[in-house]
Amino acid sequence: MGIPSDLEIATAASLRPLHEIADRLGIPQDFVEPYGRSVAKIDLDVLTAEGQPTAQRAKYVVVTAVTPTPLGEGKTTTAVGLADGLSRIGQTVAVTLRQPSMGPTFGIKGGAAGGGYAQVVPMDKLNLHLTGDFHAVTAAHNLLAAMLDNHLHHGNSLNIDPRNITWRRVLDVNDRALRNIVVGLGARIDGVTRQTGFDITAASEVMVLLTLATSLDDLKARLRRIVVGYAYDGRPVTADDLGAAGAMAVILKDALNPNLLQTIEGTPALIHCGPFGNIATGSSSVVADIVATRRADIVLTEAGFGSDMGAERFFNVKCRVAGLRPDAAVLVVTVRALKAHSGRFKITPGKALPPELLAENPGDVRAGIANLRKHIQIIEGFGIWPVVAINAFDTDFDSEHQVIRDLCTEMGVKCAVSTHVVNGGAGAEDLARTLVDALRTPSRFRFTYASDAHLTAKIEAVAKQVYGADGVDFAPPAAKALAEYERLGFGGLPVVIAKTHLSISHDPSLLGAPTGWRLPVREVRAAAGAGYVYAICGDMRTMPGLSSHPNAEKIDLVDGEIVGLS
Amino acid sequence: MGIPSDLEIATAASLRPLHEIADRLGIPQDFVEPYGRSVAKIDLDVLTAEGQPTAQRAKYVVVTAVTPTPLGEGKTTTAVGLADGLSRIGQTVAVTLRQPSMGPTFGIKGGAAGGGYAQVVPMDKLNLHLTGDFHAVTAAHNLLAAMLDNHLHHGNSLNIDPRNITWRRVLDVNDRALRNIVVGLGARIDGVTRQTGFDITAASEVMVLLTLATSLDDLKARLRRIVVGYAYDGRPVTADDLGAAGAMAVILKDALNPNLLQTIEGTPALIHCGPFGNIATGSSSVVADIVATRRADIVLTEAGFGSDMGAERFFNVKCRVAGLRPDAAVLVVTVRALKAHSGRFKITPGKALPPELLAENPGDVRAGIANLRKHIQIIEGFGIWPVVAINAFDTDFDSEHQVIRDLCTEMGVKCAVSTHVVNGGAGAEDLARTLVDALRTPSRFRFTYASDAHLTAKIEAVAKQVYGADGVDFAPPAAKALAEYERLGFGGLPVVIAKTHLSISHDPSLLGAPTGWRLPVREVRAAAGAGYVYAICGDMRTMPGLSSHPNAEKIDLVDGEIVGLS
């Protein structure tokens, strides 16, 4: 792009004092706890303290995308750049984002704090420990695991079936060797031998639980309900049964407070929690959004992957739990992604893009445009205004953008080009004005399903109404589990469908807008503590590995300065 | 004791603003980074910045003890109370302590921030995440482990012998089931199958390394030298060979900055690092002591267990690495410990003390006093003044204290009674005056061995001159390893003798001052990164377990307040 590296740009940015950032949202200093000089935590007492606002006032906007290539299409950069663009045209705005997971930073991918001139700073802290929330999740999760194995060791009075334990351990590291392990080897005093494994911390149910909790009391109630496994008689065994929920809440107490940072242009950024986008909600925290929507004119929040994934869960799970009303969705699209949906190119992370994909060819864009059309329809299905944001690359051609504009005109949808990566907030001013314009017309938000619908019906509703599947095929174990969950009282929970993000269907090879297919649900699991049931449609990896030459080999500390974090 | 619980006292304490605490040590605000409202990190640039002090000015005093009972004899409370006592008589003082490990807080033992009216606050933060240093150690340690297993997975070009890997993983949790595990099960893509295990984070070599590093550059150099295992040809494989040291340094960058807290009476307390006291140095960090000794009149630092353990390593390892000159040792003694050394009582943690031990009986104290005599001699052997501190309990009798006073008079050693747990700094003023008086006469510090002595000779010197053993018996594998370490260039390192802390010998049943015994060294290992060689004399547990009803079951969050942390 001919611009400096993300780390160079972030390091060169001059940070404003955090009290100025808090001031922009009218957060009194008493509720701002500094963590180092450039990060603060917002004390959640701000939600209940006398004289503080108590209701949503902001327009609440989710930033989502078309079905991405494996490279990602720039949702985070768009959210950050657009927030800066909105600030520039006079709006009081906050952007709320997930905290990046540290493990993958040392793997193949770089950091996730935006990029170019659309970044949250300080970028190094954001990609490392930040305020330790991920570490707190790791500690709380593993305390529960230790108490569970300790219970087996000390006589197993709860009659837990060691072959039916679902609670694993977690670490925020890409470590393939920990996926499948045997614990409790050694002498009698070294515990009960059984097979289990580690997931990455972002895949922890505790992470989703922290994301969805609305208060400390709600956090504790959700922790109590965590199911760790089943007794010999099939009864679920909970964290409450093990007496672990109180200690876990103590470990997570500070982690529930959202983190306040800033964009490189000084817009408030709340960075909080980072659950997986496949098996979990893929959203930032509910509490950060509650704080922000009571104070800003516009709150932008990112949701993982395409609108079939993150935005669907944002609407059906996050907004439901938070009691917040969404107003619009910014739908990020790239020429690259639509060309890829033509099915004419193969994109592999870590390899150069095919040169033909970079040549001017509006025909390729047109061949993939069905994907954008379908995502617009998905968002409209929620009664929400989509605003199409073309995340412009310097390899784009105007003729290619025109194909996108034509579709938007045809569908009566607002559209703008944004060049935030190269130009920062100034490059997103058009998009900002387009969004403000769209927000003038009230939305008529509706959920895909009612909370009291049957779990099976909820899954079918998402598959048919959102994805466009002809129906759902439940494998026998999945059907059995769903019936069992209804019986156990989990029937009122919302659902998450764990599937590939590379297709609107469950099959990554089905590009564009697949039709004439059925969703195969292989297995269903309950995250009773976090508060959702998830249907598994494909192989979900919950512990990444490192490549043969991981990024960690390039990351270094030279004269006290971090290098290689990208 | 008839006083409120530690948590109640700590919660009731009114904290002074941290900038006032930093002011007491003349640390400019630019170098004080707040982490929340009651904890700060001190930027290590304060050591090299223009205009800042560059040399030791403080009297440097280690707080050690007689051979403790399994209950501990109150070194931390004495260090904290004495620091407050010194403050009260007009000294500028800092106390430097280890950070407690979070895992055991949820096990059987309570927190370790002192106790009663001799505590460091905030007690809850201290016993939980504090500023995340332990989490950073966990992350850096486990990144190296992941890179090691990943290297095996991607073809093992370094020819590492999977049967000769010494690097395990760590977590800050008491989890017996993780002591011995098999990793790398599953499919081909899930890594190489081998047996390994987890230690508690406090037992990580990275923790000791962080404790002993004198600067960021030194930290990185030590990280590079970590030996993770051996190649098929016997060559040691290092973190540097795996390309991991730079990334580990990045993870540990902020963790090297000492944490500033305060006692409940407002004395500066630097809480930093917490390595194990058996296999490692059992001391707080070198950098915290370098910062403190350049600024205070007196710096008190605690070293783990009795003077044969923590103080010996403080003198021979920590002072050597830090380049600091020690001036005195406060030797904590309790009536309880000396009665226990009579061999007439059995003390079991979690059970009530035998009633006969609590009855007035100076004869029992006299029967155990050889232990105190030996510890006085150990300290004098370093050319250092011992000051005996009687940590008074309300079950003590004056006739029993008199036995201790008589021995001190006989040996020409200063002695004072301290009641800091009940009376805070006021209860330690006598001890404070006694220490100040002792510090008027310069000490003539000497190491037990020269750095260039042979490793075998170093171990023999400690065993004979410090412990009073007749000699050392090296098991054949130990002798072989020592010869190999000399060949590999580790000969210049200091030694740590890993043995029980319940006897001056290697045998916990030998009370008082054992004579006529030889030290059996079963095994020798190198912590080449941290920078020492350790000789193992007994079974060292490096991953604790939880009891049948761990403390975690009682710890809870009630109306947003922590309860049950004791």
Image (tube, coloured by chain):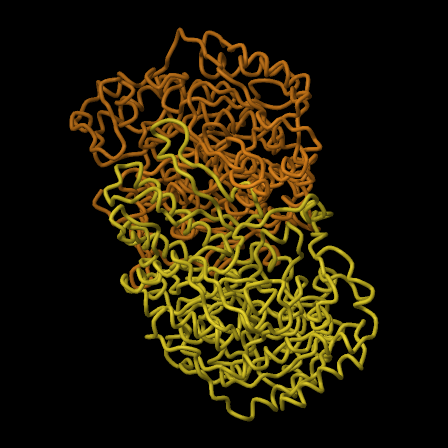
Chain colours: A orange, B yellow
What is the x, y in percent for residue A363? 21, 18
Task: Check the image and name the residue furthest to the front.
Answer: B516
What is the x, y in percent for residue B202? 51, 56
Residue at x 50% of width, y 14% of height: A465
Q: Along the line of sight, which residue is nearer the eye, A232 or A133?
A: A232
Q: Is residue B538 visible?
A: yes
Q: Along the line of sight, which residue is nearer the eye, A40 or A446?
A: A40
Quadrant of the rendered image containing residue A503: top left
User: Across the whole image, how many numbered discs are drawn on residues?
Assistant: 0
Q: Along the horizontal axis of the image, is A336 left or right of B200?
A: left
Q: Taking A452 as reference, is A547 above or below it?
A: below
- If the image is split into quadrants, where does the N terminus of chain B sit? bottom right
Q: Taking B60 as reference, is A37 above or below it?
A: above
Q: Taking B329 as reference, is A316 above or below it?
A: above
- If the image is split into quadrants, where does the C terminus of chain B sit? bottom right
Q: Along the horizontal axis of the image, is B314 left or right of B554?
A: left
Q: Is residue A92 visible?
A: no
Q: Taking A191 as reference, is A307 above or below it?
A: above
Task: Check the image and name the residue furthest to the bottom.
Answer: B441
What is the x, y in percent for residue A17? 47, 60
Quadrant of the rendered image containing residue B522: bottom left
Q: Along the horizontal axis of the image, is B186 left or right of A20?
A: left
What is the x, y in percent for residue B45? 39, 70
Q: Along the line of sight, which residue is nearer the eye, B555 or A287?
A: B555
Q: Along the horizontal axis of the image, is B466 left or right of B147?
A: right
Q: Along the line of sight, which residue is nearer the eye, B182 or B345?
A: B345
